Amino acid sequence: MSLVQKDFQALKDCIHALEPQLGQIEHTGELILQRLIEGKTIFACGNGGSATDSMHLCEELVGRYRDNRRPLPAVSLNTDTSVLTCIGNDYGFDAIFSRQIEALGKQDDVLVGFSTSGNSENIALAFEAAKKNGVTTLLLSGKDGGKIKSIADYSVIIPSSNTARIQELHTFILHAWLELVENHDWS
């Protein structure tokens, strides 16, 4: 079996292992939709490749996924370079997301944290800050969900320790959420 075939098989195995969580994926997508209907903001954050997932989710909500509809309030917390460098310089890297949630997060907003390990300290601190502001937290992770799983209000854990497979399925999940959002009548 070639390397590509092995990777493909590993992805198929992860997809199959994720199937028992489809109800949780739908439930969290409906939660995001309901909060958007109520005018709440969706925040997202992640590090490295997971930062890209954060940006992907938010740009599709503010712009559009597939169909024309009104823009929806979403902010990726890892995109404002001046804010990140200010907070990182003055408070440390671990505070780059929590400080923003303290400033911007309001009751019943949603914070989606992408962390393949579930142990990213800056995301854990953001979830703790979110709790103080009444922001609902939603973790997309892998492995065993790490320490953030116990902080999160909701979590979807990809049953794998392979970062590439975890991130591939995070993309599936955010696209599934976007399908639910775009199937709502926004007129």
Image (cartoon, rainbow, N blue to C red):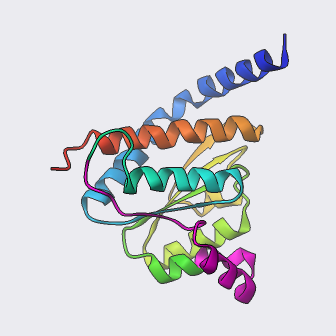
Question: Can residue 85 be seen?
Answer: yes
Residue 112's x, y, as percent? 52, 58
Q: Residue furthest left?
A: 187
Q: Eyeballing the image, is 11 above or below 58?
A: above
In reply to whether residue 47 is colored magenta, the answer given is: no
> At x 60% / y 36%, what residue is drawn?
169
Q: Is residue 15 left or right of residue 48?
A: left
Question: Can residue 139 be seen?
Answer: no
Q: Eyeballing the image, is 91 above or below 74?
A: below
Pick the quarter of the image with the N terminus. Answer: top right
> At x 40% / y 39%, what residue is drawn?
26
From the viewer's side, name the closer residue of 143 and 150.
143
In reply to whether residue 96 is colored magenta, the answer given is: yes
Q: Quadrant of residue 55?
A: bottom right
Q: Is residue 158 left or right of residue 117?
A: left
Q: Which residues are magenta?
A: 69-98
Residue 135's x, y, as percent? 44, 70
